[in-house]
Protein backbone atom coordinates (compact mmCIF):
# COMPACT_ATOMS: atom_id res chain seq x y z
CA UNK A 1 0.00 0.00 0.00
CA UNK A 2 1.63 3.26 -1.13
CA UNK A 3 1.87 6.41 0.92
CA UNK A 4 -1.26 8.25 -0.29
CA UNK A 5 -3.45 5.13 -0.22
CA UNK A 6 -2.35 4.39 3.32
CA UNK A 7 -2.90 7.98 4.47
CA UNK A 8 -6.38 8.08 2.93
CA UNK A 9 -7.29 4.82 4.64
CA UNK A 10 -5.87 5.86 8.01
CA UNK A 11 -7.75 9.18 7.82
CA UNK A 12 -11.07 7.38 7.42
CA UNK A 13 -11.92 8.98 4.06
CA UNK A 14 -15.09 7.64 2.41
CA UNK A 15 -17.22 8.87 -0.45
CA UNK A 16 -19.07 11.94 0.80
CA UNK A 17 -21.61 11.79 -2.01
CA UNK A 18 -23.81 9.38 -0.09
CA UNK A 19 -22.68 5.76 -0.50
CA UNK A 20 -19.69 6.01 1.81
CA UNK A 21 -17.42 3.70 -0.21
CA UNK A 22 -13.89 3.65 1.30
CA UNK A 23 -11.83 5.96 -0.90
CA UNK A 24 -8.52 4.16 -0.46
CA UNK A 25 -9.91 1.25 -2.48
CA UNK A 26 -11.04 3.43 -5.40
CA UNK A 27 -7.80 5.38 -5.71
CA UNK A 28 -5.69 2.28 -6.24
CA UNK A 29 -6.98 2.01 -9.84
CA UNK A 30 -5.03 3.26 -12.85
CA UNK A 31 -7.27 5.50 -14.96
CA UNK A 32 -7.18 8.09 -17.74
CA UNK A 33 -9.70 10.57 -16.32
CA UNK A 34 -10.41 11.85 -12.80
CA UNK A 35 -13.85 13.47 -12.42
CA UNK A 36 -14.66 15.75 -9.48
CA UNK A 37 -18.40 15.55 -8.97
CA UNK A 38 -19.82 18.92 -7.98
CA UNK A 39 -23.01 18.62 -10.02
CA UNK A 40 -25.21 18.32 -6.91
CA UNK A 41 -28.69 17.59 -8.22
CA UNK A 42 -30.86 17.14 -5.09
CA UNK A 43 -33.20 20.14 -4.72
CA UNK A 44 -32.18 22.77 -2.11
CA UNK A 45 -28.78 21.23 -1.25
CA UNK A 46 -25.75 23.53 -1.49
CA UNK A 47 -22.93 21.59 0.12
CA UNK A 48 -20.96 20.85 -3.06
CA UNK A 49 -21.14 24.49 -4.15
CA UNK A 50 -19.92 25.52 -0.71
CA UNK A 51 -16.95 23.17 -1.03
CA UNK A 52 -16.10 24.58 -4.47
CA UNK A 53 -16.36 28.18 -3.30
CA UNK A 54 -14.85 27.93 0.20
CA UNK A 55 -12.31 25.11 -0.07
CA UNK A 56 -11.04 25.53 -3.62
CA UNK A 57 -7.36 25.04 -2.83
CA UNK A 58 -7.96 21.77 -1.00
CA UNK A 59 -10.27 20.57 -3.79
CA UNK A 60 -7.74 21.22 -6.55
CA UNK A 61 -4.91 19.78 -4.47
CA UNK A 62 -6.97 16.64 -3.93
CA UNK A 63 -7.55 16.36 -7.68
CA UNK A 64 -3.84 16.81 -8.39
CA UNK A 65 -2.95 14.10 -5.87
CA UNK A 66 -5.43 11.67 -7.39
CA UNK A 67 -4.31 12.37 -10.94
CA UNK A 68 -0.74 11.64 -9.93
CA UNK A 69 -1.77 8.55 -7.95
CA UNK A 70 -3.89 7.07 -10.75
CA UNK A 71 -1.81 8.20 -13.72
CA UNK A 72 -4.70 10.24 -15.14
CA UNK A 73 -3.78 12.84 -17.75
CA UNK A 74 -7.18 14.53 -17.71
CA UNK A 75 -9.08 16.06 -14.83
CA UNK A 76 -12.67 17.29 -15.06
CA UNK A 77 -14.69 19.30 -12.53
CA UNK A 78 -18.41 18.85 -13.17
CA UNK A 79 -20.71 21.70 -12.08
CA UNK A 80 -24.26 22.53 -13.08
CA UNK A 81 -24.34 25.50 -15.44
CA UNK A 82 -26.82 27.28 -13.14
CA UNK A 83 -24.21 27.66 -10.40
CA UNK A 84 -22.71 30.90 -11.74
CA UNK A 85 -21.01 31.77 -8.43
CA UNK A 86 -19.13 28.49 -8.30
CA UNK A 87 -18.11 28.69 -11.95
CA UNK A 88 -16.89 32.29 -11.73
CA UNK A 89 -14.91 31.49 -8.59
CA UNK A 90 -13.19 28.27 -9.66
CA UNK A 91 -12.64 28.79 -13.39
CA UNK A 92 -9.62 31.16 -13.10
CA UNK A 93 -7.99 28.74 -10.63
CA UNK A 94 -8.02 25.65 -12.84
CA UNK A 95 -4.65 24.38 -14.07
CA UNK A 96 -4.16 23.39 -17.70
CA UNK A 97 -4.86 19.69 -17.09
CA UNK A 98 -8.21 20.24 -15.33
CA UNK A 99 -11.23 21.35 -17.32
CA UNK A 100 -14.70 22.49 -16.33
CA UNK A 101 -17.73 20.49 -17.49
CA UNK A 102 -20.99 22.42 -17.29
CA UNK A 103 -23.90 20.06 -16.69
CA UNK A 104 -27.51 20.96 -17.54
CA UNK A 105 -29.88 21.90 -14.72
CA UNK A 106 -31.46 18.45 -14.75
CA UNK A 107 -32.02 15.69 -12.25
CA UNK A 108 -30.01 13.45 -11.78
CA UNK A 109 -27.08 15.28 -13.44
CA UNK A 110 -24.83 14.28 -10.55
CA UNK A 111 -25.40 10.55 -11.01
CA UNK A 112 -22.07 8.80 -11.64
CA UNK A 113 -23.35 7.02 -14.76
CA UNK A 114 -24.69 10.25 -16.23
CA UNK A 115 -21.45 12.13 -15.52
CA UNK A 116 -19.20 9.52 -17.05
CA UNK A 117 -21.29 9.29 -20.21
CA UNK A 118 -21.58 13.06 -20.64
CA UNK A 119 -17.85 13.64 -20.10
CA UNK A 120 -16.30 10.67 -21.90
CA UNK A 121 -19.00 9.50 -24.30
CA UNK A 122 -18.58 5.99 -22.86
CA UNK A 123 -20.92 4.04 -20.61
CA UNK A 124 -19.92 2.29 -17.41
CA UNK A 125 -20.55 -1.42 -18.01
CA UNK A 126 -23.80 -2.68 -16.49
CA UNK A 127 -22.97 -3.96 -13.02
CA UNK A 128 -19.47 -2.49 -13.39
CA UNK A 129 -17.47 0.47 -12.13
CA UNK A 130 -16.05 3.65 -13.71
CA UNK A 131 -12.53 2.21 -13.46
CA UNK A 132 -13.59 -0.46 -15.98
CA UNK A 133 -13.45 2.25 -18.65
CA UNK A 134 -10.53 4.20 -17.20
CA UNK A 135 -12.42 6.73 -15.07
CA UNK A 136 -12.38 7.65 -11.37
CA UNK A 137 -15.23 9.73 -9.92
CA UNK A 138 -15.03 11.42 -6.52
CA UNK A 139 -17.35 13.89 -4.83
CA UNK A 140 -15.76 17.32 -4.30
CA UNK A 141 -15.96 16.99 -0.51
CA UNK A 142 -14.17 13.65 -0.71
CA UNK A 143 -11.36 15.33 -2.66
CA UNK A 144 -10.97 17.92 0.09
CA UNK A 145 -10.74 15.09 2.63
CA UNK A 146 -8.13 13.33 0.50
CA UNK A 147 -6.02 16.49 0.33
CA UNK A 148 -6.21 16.83 4.09
CA UNK A 149 -5.51 13.13 4.63
CA UNK A 150 -2.25 13.59 2.72
CA UNK A 151 -1.31 16.06 5.45
CA UNK A 152 -2.30 13.70 8.25
CA UNK A 153 -5.74 15.17 9.02
CA UNK A 154 -8.48 12.59 9.69
CA UNK A 155 -12.15 12.97 8.79
CA UNK A 156 -13.95 14.43 11.79
CA UNK A 157 -16.43 16.77 10.08
CA UNK A 158 -18.93 16.70 7.25
CA UNK A 159 -20.47 19.40 5.07
CA UNK A 160 -24.22 19.62 5.69
CA UNK A 161 -26.99 21.79 4.23
CA UNK A 162 -30.01 22.59 6.44
CA UNK A 163 -33.09 23.84 4.59
CA UNK A 164 -36.88 23.76 4.51
CA UNK A 165 -38.97 24.93 7.45
CA UNK A 166 -36.20 26.83 9.22
CA UNK A 167 -35.62 30.56 9.66
CA UNK A 168 -32.13 30.75 8.16
CA UNK A 169 -31.07 27.92 5.81
CA UNK A 170 -27.32 27.35 5.82
CA UNK A 171 -24.49 25.03 4.89
CA UNK A 172 -21.70 24.35 7.38
CA UNK A 173 -18.78 22.04 8.17
CA UNK A 174 -19.94 20.25 11.31
CA UNK A 175 -18.57 17.59 13.69
CA UNK A 176 -19.63 14.04 12.88
CA UNK A 177 -22.04 12.78 15.55
CA UNK A 178 -23.90 16.03 16.24
CA UNK A 179 -27.61 15.52 16.91
CA UNK A 180 -30.02 16.63 14.19
CA UNK A 181 -31.65 18.88 16.80
CA UNK A 182 -28.36 20.69 17.49
CA UNK A 183 -27.56 21.03 13.79
CA UNK A 184 -31.01 22.39 12.95
CA UNK A 185 -30.88 24.84 15.86
CA UNK A 186 -28.08 26.67 14.03
CA UNK A 187 -30.71 27.65 11.45
CA UNK A 188 -32.87 29.43 14.03
CA UNK A 189 -36.41 28.35 14.84
CA UNK A 190 -38.28 25.58 13.07
CA UNK A 191 -41.16 27.30 11.28
CA UNK A 192 -43.77 24.52 11.17
CA UNK A 193 -45.67 22.32 13.57
CA UNK A 194 -44.88 18.60 13.85
CA UNK A 195 -41.66 18.62 11.78
CA UNK A 196 -39.77 15.64 10.41
CA UNK A 197 -36.45 15.55 8.59
CA UNK A 198 -35.53 14.11 5.22
CA UNK A 199 -31.91 13.11 5.66
CA UNK A 200 -29.88 13.28 2.45
CA UNK A 201 -32.20 15.01 -0.01
CA UNK A 202 -35.84 15.04 -1.08
CA UNK A 203 -35.41 12.45 -3.84
CA UNK A 204 -33.06 9.87 -2.35
CA UNK A 205 -32.90 10.65 1.37
CA UNK A 206 -34.75 8.97 4.22
CA UNK A 207 -37.50 10.33 6.45
CA UNK A 208 -36.27 10.62 10.05
CA UNK A 209 -38.58 11.47 12.94
CA UNK A 210 -36.10 11.29 15.82
CA UNK A 211 -34.13 14.54 16.10
CA UNK A 212 -31.69 12.78 18.44
CA UNK A 213 -30.31 11.02 15.35
CA UNK A 214 -26.66 11.97 14.70
CA UNK A 215 -25.11 13.13 11.45
CA UNK A 216 -22.47 10.86 9.95
CA UNK A 217 -19.52 11.21 7.58
CA UNK A 218 -21.88 10.74 4.63
CA UNK A 219 -24.56 13.21 5.75
CA UNK A 220 -25.25 15.85 3.10
CA UNK A 221 -28.51 17.60 3.94
CA UNK A 222 -31.26 17.88 6.52
CA UNK A 223 -34.52 19.01 4.97
CA UNK A 224 -37.07 20.03 7.63
CA UNK A 225 -40.67 19.57 6.50
CA UNK A 226 -44.14 19.27 8.07
CA UNK A 227 -45.16 15.67 8.62
CA UNK A 228 -48.41 16.13 6.70
CA UNK A 229 -46.85 17.21 3.38
CA UNK A 230 -47.42 14.99 0.36
CA UNK A 231 -43.69 14.41 -0.10
CA UNK A 232 -43.22 13.15 3.46
CA UNK A 233 -46.31 10.95 3.24
CA UNK A 234 -45.10 9.36 0.02
CA UNK A 235 -41.57 8.87 1.33
CA UNK A 236 -42.96 7.26 4.52
CA UNK A 237 -45.00 4.46 2.93
CA UNK A 238 -44.39 1.01 4.40
CA UNK A 239 -43.51 -1.94 2.17
CA UNK A 240 -46.93 -3.44 2.80
CA UNK A 241 -48.61 -0.20 1.71
CA UNK A 242 -46.66 0.47 -1.48
CA UNK A 243 -46.90 -3.14 -2.64
CA UNK A 244 -50.63 -3.36 -1.94
CA UNK A 245 -51.34 -0.05 -3.70
CA UNK A 246 -49.01 -0.89 -6.58
CA UNK A 247 -50.61 -4.27 -7.11
CA UNK A 248 -54.08 -2.77 -7.37
CA UNK A 249 -53.32 0.55 -9.07
CA UNK A 250 -50.65 0.02 -11.75
CA UNK A 251 -52.12 0.19 -15.27
CA UNK A 252 -48.81 -0.59 -17.02
CA UNK A 253 -48.56 2.80 -18.74
CA UNK A 254 -44.72 2.34 -18.86
CA UNK A 255 -43.99 6.00 -18.00
CA UNK A 256 -41.82 4.90 -15.06
CA UNK A 257 -39.60 3.03 -17.52
CA UNK A 258 -39.70 5.61 -20.32
CA UNK A 259 -38.46 8.35 -17.93
CA UNK A 260 -35.86 6.21 -16.11
CA UNK A 261 -32.36 7.71 -16.63
CA UNK A 262 -30.66 4.32 -16.57
CA UNK A 263 -33.16 2.86 -19.05
CA UNK A 264 -32.54 5.84 -21.35
CA UNK A 265 -28.80 5.09 -21.17
CA UNK A 266 -29.58 1.57 -22.34
CA UNK A 267 -29.24 -0.35 -19.10
CA UNK A 268 -31.57 -3.35 -18.41
CA UNK A 269 -33.93 -1.64 -15.97
CA UNK A 270 -37.70 -1.59 -16.60
CA UNK A 271 -39.70 -0.55 -13.51
CA UNK A 272 -43.07 -1.22 -15.17
CA UNK A 273 -42.15 -4.91 -15.50
CA UNK A 274 -41.14 -5.00 -11.85
CA UNK A 275 -44.57 -3.52 -11.02
CA UNK A 276 -46.15 -6.28 -13.13
CA UNK A 277 -44.31 -8.88 -11.04
CA UNK A 278 -46.55 -7.93 -8.11
CA UNK A 279 -49.36 -9.72 -9.94
CA UNK A 280 -47.45 -12.92 -10.69
CA UNK A 281 -45.69 -15.76 -8.88
CA UNK A 282 -43.13 -18.43 -9.62
CA UNK A 283 -40.99 -18.38 -12.77
CA UNK A 284 -42.97 -15.55 -14.39
CA UNK A 285 -42.44 -13.31 -11.37
CA UNK A 286 -38.71 -14.13 -11.30
CA UNK A 287 -38.37 -13.26 -14.99
CA UNK A 288 -40.02 -9.88 -14.42
CA UNK A 289 -38.21 -9.12 -11.14
CA UNK A 290 -34.71 -9.18 -12.62
CA UNK A 291 -35.53 -5.91 -14.39
CA UNK A 292 -35.06 -4.18 -11.00
CA UNK A 293 -31.38 -4.99 -10.54
CA UNK A 294 -29.99 -2.04 -12.53
CA UNK A 295 -32.13 0.48 -10.61
CA UNK A 296 -30.09 3.40 -9.21
CA UNK A 297 -32.93 4.42 -6.84
CA UNK A 298 -33.06 8.00 -8.13
CA UNK A 299 -36.85 8.12 -7.56
CA UNK A 300 -37.79 9.73 -10.88
CA UNK A 301 -40.22 6.88 -11.54
CA UNK A 302 -42.09 7.50 -8.28
CA UNK A 303 -41.87 11.24 -7.67
CA UNK A 304 -41.91 12.47 -11.27
CA UNK A 305 -43.15 9.93 -13.81
CA UNK A 306 -45.99 7.88 -12.33
CA UNK A 307 -49.41 9.51 -13.00
CA UNK A 308 -51.03 7.32 -10.34
CA UNK A 309 -48.60 8.34 -7.55
CA UNK A 310 -47.48 4.74 -7.11
CA UNK A 311 -44.05 3.76 -5.81
CA UNK A 312 -42.00 1.87 -8.44
CA UNK A 313 -38.73 2.97 -6.84
CA UNK A 314 -39.30 1.35 -3.46
CA UNK A 315 -40.75 -1.73 -5.14
CA UNK A 316 -37.51 -1.98 -7.15
CA UNK A 317 -35.49 -1.58 -3.93
CA UNK A 318 -37.46 -4.35 -2.19
CA UNK A 319 -37.17 -6.54 -5.26
CA UNK A 320 -33.38 -6.11 -5.39
CA UNK A 321 -33.20 -7.25 -1.78
CA UNK A 322 -35.29 -10.31 -2.61
CA UNK A 323 -33.24 -11.13 -5.71
CA UNK A 324 -30.12 -11.33 -3.55
CA UNK A 325 -31.86 -13.35 -0.85
CA UNK A 326 -33.16 -15.88 -3.42
CA UNK A 327 -29.88 -16.20 -5.32
CA UNK A 328 -31.35 -14.59 -8.44
CA UNK A 329 -28.80 -11.77 -8.66
CA UNK A 330 -27.40 -11.52 -12.19
CA UNK A 331 -23.67 -11.32 -12.86
CA UNK A 332 -22.24 -8.15 -14.45
CA UNK A 333 -21.78 -10.07 -17.69
CA UNK A 334 -25.41 -11.21 -17.69
CA UNK A 335 -26.50 -7.61 -17.15
CA UNK A 336 -24.16 -6.36 -19.83
CA UNK A 337 -25.55 -8.88 -22.31
CA UNK A 338 -28.97 -7.24 -21.87
CA UNK A 339 -27.72 -3.67 -22.38
CA UNK A 340 -29.11 -1.81 -25.40
CA UNK A 341 -28.05 1.26 -27.32
CA UNK A 342 -28.65 4.66 -25.73
CA UNK A 343 -32.30 5.60 -26.24
CA UNK A 344 -32.88 7.95 -29.19
CA UNK A 345 -35.09 10.19 -27.01
CA UNK A 346 -32.71 10.47 -24.07
CA UNK A 347 -31.78 14.10 -24.76
CA UNK A 348 -35.45 15.10 -24.66
CA UNK A 349 -36.48 13.32 -21.45
CA UNK A 350 -34.35 15.07 -18.86
CA UNK A 351 -36.12 16.17 -15.69
CA UNK A 352 -35.69 19.96 -15.20
CA UNK A 353 -34.62 20.63 -11.62
CA UNK A 354 -36.80 23.72 -11.25
CA UNK A 355 -39.94 21.88 -12.34
CA UNK A 356 -39.03 18.93 -10.13
CA UNK A 357 -38.71 21.26 -7.14
CA UNK A 358 -42.22 22.58 -7.82
CA UNK A 359 -43.67 19.11 -8.25
CA UNK A 360 -42.17 18.03 -4.93
CA UNK A 361 -43.85 20.99 -3.18
CA UNK A 362 -40.51 22.62 -2.34
CA UNK A 363 -40.73 25.76 -4.51
CA UNK A 364 -41.57 27.95 -1.48
CA UNK A 365 -38.10 27.24 -0.06
CA UNK A 366 -36.17 27.63 -3.31
CA UNK A 367 -35.95 31.43 -3.07
CA UNK A 368 -33.48 31.07 -0.19
CA UNK A 369 -30.03 29.62 -0.84
CA UNK A 370 -28.40 27.75 2.03
CA UNK A 371 -25.18 29.78 1.97
CA UNK A 372 -21.97 28.99 3.83
CA UNK A 373 -22.13 29.52 7.58
CA UNK A 374 -18.63 29.81 9.02
CA UNK A 375 -19.37 28.71 12.55
CA UNK A 376 -17.13 27.21 15.21
CA UNK A 377 -19.33 24.53 16.76
CA UNK A 378 -18.38 22.74 19.97
CA UNK A 379 -21.20 20.34 20.83
CA UNK A 380 -21.37 19.09 24.40
CA UNK A 381 -21.86 15.55 23.08
CA UNK A 382 -21.48 13.65 19.84
CA UNK A 383 -22.76 10.15 19.11
CA UNK A 384 -20.76 8.65 16.27
CA UNK A 385 -22.34 5.73 14.37
CA UNK A 386 -20.06 2.72 14.01
CA UNK A 387 -21.61 1.69 10.70
CA UNK A 388 -21.90 4.79 8.54
CA UNK A 389 -20.23 3.58 5.36
CA UNK A 390 -19.75 0.61 3.06
CA UNK A 391 -17.36 -2.16 4.11
CA UNK A 392 -16.96 -3.90 7.43
CA UNK A 393 -18.07 -2.21 10.61
CA UNK A 394 -15.11 -1.00 12.67
CA UNK A 395 -14.63 -2.29 16.19
CA UNK A 396 -14.16 0.14 19.12
CA UNK A 397 -10.56 0.49 20.28
CA UNK A 398 -11.63 2.58 23.28
CA UNK A 399 -13.74 1.70 26.29
CA UNK A 400 -16.27 3.53 28.42
CA UNK A 401 -14.56 6.12 30.57
CA UNK A 402 -11.56 6.71 28.30
CA UNK A 403 -10.51 10.27 27.55
CA UNK A 404 -9.77 10.97 23.87
CA UNK A 405 -8.53 13.95 21.91
CA UNK A 406 -10.21 15.23 18.78
CA UNK A 407 -8.93 13.20 15.83
CA UNK A 408 -7.99 10.14 17.87
CA UNK A 409 -8.88 6.72 16.44
CA UNK A 410 -11.88 5.35 18.36
CA UNK A 411 -12.77 2.34 16.18
CA UNK A 412 -10.87 0.37 13.56
CA UNK A 413 -11.59 -2.44 11.08
CA UNK A 414 -10.34 -5.90 11.99
CA UNK A 415 -8.39 -8.17 9.65
CA UNK A 416 -7.86 -7.64 5.93
CA UNK A 417 -11.45 -6.76 4.93
CA UNK A 418 -12.39 -3.47 3.31
CA UNK A 419 -12.92 -0.76 5.91
CA UNK A 420 -11.58 2.42 7.49
CA UNK A 421 -11.19 3.68 11.06
CA UNK A 422 -13.40 6.19 12.86
CA UNK A 423 -12.02 9.26 14.61
CA UNK A 424 -13.24 11.36 17.52
CA UNK A 425 -14.86 14.55 16.26
CA UNK A 426 -14.44 16.29 19.63
CA UNK A 427 -12.25 15.72 22.65
CA UNK A 428 -13.83 14.22 25.75
CA UNK A 429 -14.90 11.13 27.66
CA UNK A 430 -16.13 8.00 25.87
CA UNK A 431 -19.29 5.99 26.45
CA UNK A 432 -19.80 2.84 24.40
CA UNK A 433 -23.37 2.33 23.17
CA UNK A 434 -24.98 -0.29 20.96
CA UNK A 435 -23.77 0.61 17.46
CA UNK A 436 -22.42 4.01 18.52
CA UNK A 437 -19.57 5.67 20.38
CA UNK A 438 -20.66 8.71 22.39
CA UNK A 439 -18.18 11.36 23.48
CA UNK A 440 -19.01 13.96 26.14
CA UNK A 441 -16.93 17.09 25.83
CA UNK A 442 -14.30 17.55 28.49
CA UNK A 443 -15.09 20.39 30.90
Image (cartoon, helix red, strand yellow):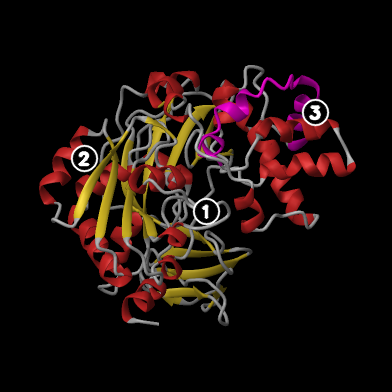
The Cα atoms of the two marked residues, 1 and 3, are separated by: 34 Å
User: How would you rate the neighbour count of disc 3 (Cα within 10 Å): few for under 14, some for 14-19, many for 20 or more?
Assistant: few
Is residue 29 toward the left or the right of residue 395 in the image? left
Residue 324 visible? The answer is: yes
Residue 394 place in picture, x, y as percent: 55, 72
Q: Secondary structure at mark 1?
A: loop
Residue 218 place in picture, x, y as percent: 45, 53
Tell me the quadrant of the picture where the C terminus can be found: bottom left
Q: Is residue 254 magenta?
A: yes
Which disc, if any, is residue 407?
Answer: none
Q: Which residues are magenta?
A: 239-266
Residue 191 visible? The answer is: no
Residue designated by label 3? 244
Residue designated by label 2? 86
Nearer the camera: disc 2 or disc 1: 1
Is residue 73 toward the left or the right of residue 202 in the image? left
Amino acid sequence: MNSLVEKVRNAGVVGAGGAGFPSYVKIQAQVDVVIANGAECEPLLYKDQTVIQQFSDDLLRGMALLMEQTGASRGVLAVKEKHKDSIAHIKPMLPANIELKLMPNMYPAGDEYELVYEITGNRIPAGGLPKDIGVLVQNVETLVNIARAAEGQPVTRTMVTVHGEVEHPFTAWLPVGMRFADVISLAGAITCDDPVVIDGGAMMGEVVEDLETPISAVSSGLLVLPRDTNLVKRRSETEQQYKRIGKSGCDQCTLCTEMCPRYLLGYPIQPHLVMRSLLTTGEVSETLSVHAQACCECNICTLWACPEQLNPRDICVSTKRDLKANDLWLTPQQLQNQTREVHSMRDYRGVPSQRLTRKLGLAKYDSKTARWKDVAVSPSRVTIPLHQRMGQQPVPVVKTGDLVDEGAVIAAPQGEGMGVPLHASIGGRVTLLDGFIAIDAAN
